Amino acid sequence: MKNNWKHLWENLPITRKLFLEIAVTAVVLFASNLFIYAQINQMVERMNSVYMSNVNLNELSDALTGVQNYMYKYLQVKDSESLNDYYRAEQDYRKLLEGLSVAVTDNQIQILEKNIHNMSDSYLRLTDETVQAKRGQNVEKYKSSYEAALKLYQFINHDISVLNSQQFKNNSASYQTLQAALQYLEVISSVILVIVMIISITVMMMMTKDIVTPLTDLAHTAKLVGQGNFHVKVPPIRAGDELGIVTGTFNQMVDSLDEYVNKIKESAEKEQEMKERELLMENHLKEAQLKYLQFQINPHFLFNCLNAGVQLAMMEDAEKTSVFMEKMADFFRYNVKKGSEDATIREEVETVENYIYILNVRFAGDIRYDSRIDEGAMDISIPSMILQPLVENAVNHGIRNIDWPGKIHLTVKNCPEEIEIRIEDNGKGMEKEKLERIRAGGQTAEEADSTGIGLHNVISRLSLYYKDDGIFHIFSEGEDKGTAVVLRIPKRGGNVHVSDTGS
């Protein structure tokens, strides 16, 4: 039988187990409290009834006094109100007399009660005769009746007082006995309640342990599994409740995880090797691509410039030829030196100025160039050969062969988060389709015939260098409305360096 109950308990769902534990504990505690409450309430009622006899005797004495006073008042004033008060007091007194014992007995208290009852009957007859004699104006009669009633009133009042004293003594002894019994009952009730609570808590702890222990083991094992230890198991549970199912499933899951993690580790090691090889190849490819883009300078430009120098030497004296050749030397020295290095914005601007000087020598000063440079941005590092190709593009495809004076304006602005470089011309401008093609990184037909590094080269190098496609921007309002190229160089992020900024 015991094994059957144990088997039934183990297979109960956890919700029912918890419900049974709480229900049994609540029922036991409620029954204990109900029993204690009933005993204490019964004792309190007995204590309240102890002094009721004294209360009744006091009420009887007050009613007797009321009959005597209202009778006397009527004899004095003889009005209907006093008469009504007298009759009402008489009725109240007669009702209270019904509570007195009239049995024949040898009990002293009951004998007193019988005497008071008999004297009260006689007293009420005398008071009634007195009132009737007063109403009949029989002076002699009501005086004698009043005096007899007064004496009897005094005897009754005295006996009531004696009875009240004896009752009080008896009730005091009974009250002390009941009070001691009540205190004893309180102690017994407290002891019973404590015992019931201890038993209930003990039973609940024993029943709850069967539920909590597997959960604790499961939590501890799960923590170890979370730390990567897949060789631990939860102690098996024979119970058929949710804990038994979860424990068995958890152990199966740990076995599966161990096997899966081993496979993942093997796959991850192989994948890591492949990624390392791919990353190495990608880095080599990007390095080769960046260097390739940096060194795309058309040698035809060098030959044309040298021919211009020869022609200038034939037409002018050696001083201007010396300046021209010096600018040429600085320009190509910068190209050779900075081919694979970064440059500052100051060096890029100086190269642009040298380039404009060389062009103005070639084309007899047709190019008007001005600049507005923020000195605080001049020492910011950027990829080399960025600005000169943009200015070259503005000359060749913007202001070359136009019918109005061509102008190029260079602006370098030091903003809080970036350096803004703007190259503007007032030349031919661009159509919307061509702008979109350039923004997308496509190479135009004009650029393919360029004498130097084109827009596609600049856009590609900026994208590779800063790992951001939002560096290069180009704008034009349409044909014959000029073109503006804007570079927004970030001060932080990418490969940007600040060597000695003034900002």
Image (cartoon, rainbow, N blue to C red):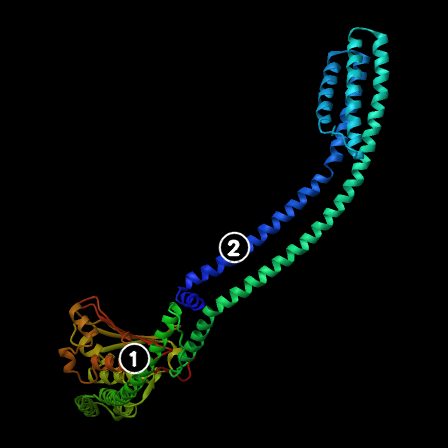
Q: To which quarter of the image does residue 61 belong?
A: top right
Query: Where is mark 1, residue-wise?
Result: 467
Q: Is residue 129 above or below residue 278?
A: above
Q: The C terminus appears in which quarter of the rendering? A: bottom left
Q: To which quarter of the image does residue 271 belong?
A: bottom left
Q: Amino acid at mark 1?
A: Lys
- Which residue sits at x=67%, y=53%? 186
Question: 28 or 105, which is in the foreground?
Answer: 105
Q: Is residue 204 above or below residue 88?
A: below
Q: Position of residue 418 (x, y in %)?
A: 36, 74
- Which residue sits at x=72%, y=23%? 94
Question: 89 or 98, which is in the foreground?
Answer: 98
Q: To which quarter of the image does residue 121 belong?
A: top right
Res. 428 in view? no
Q: Position of residue 290 (x, y in %)?
A: 25, 87
Q: Amino acid at mark 2?
A: Val
Query: Where is mark 2, residue-wise?
Result: 27
- Which residue sits at x=18%, y=67%? 478
Direction from residue 27 to residue 452 in the image, left or right:
left
Direction from residue 447 to residue 373 in the image, left or right:
right
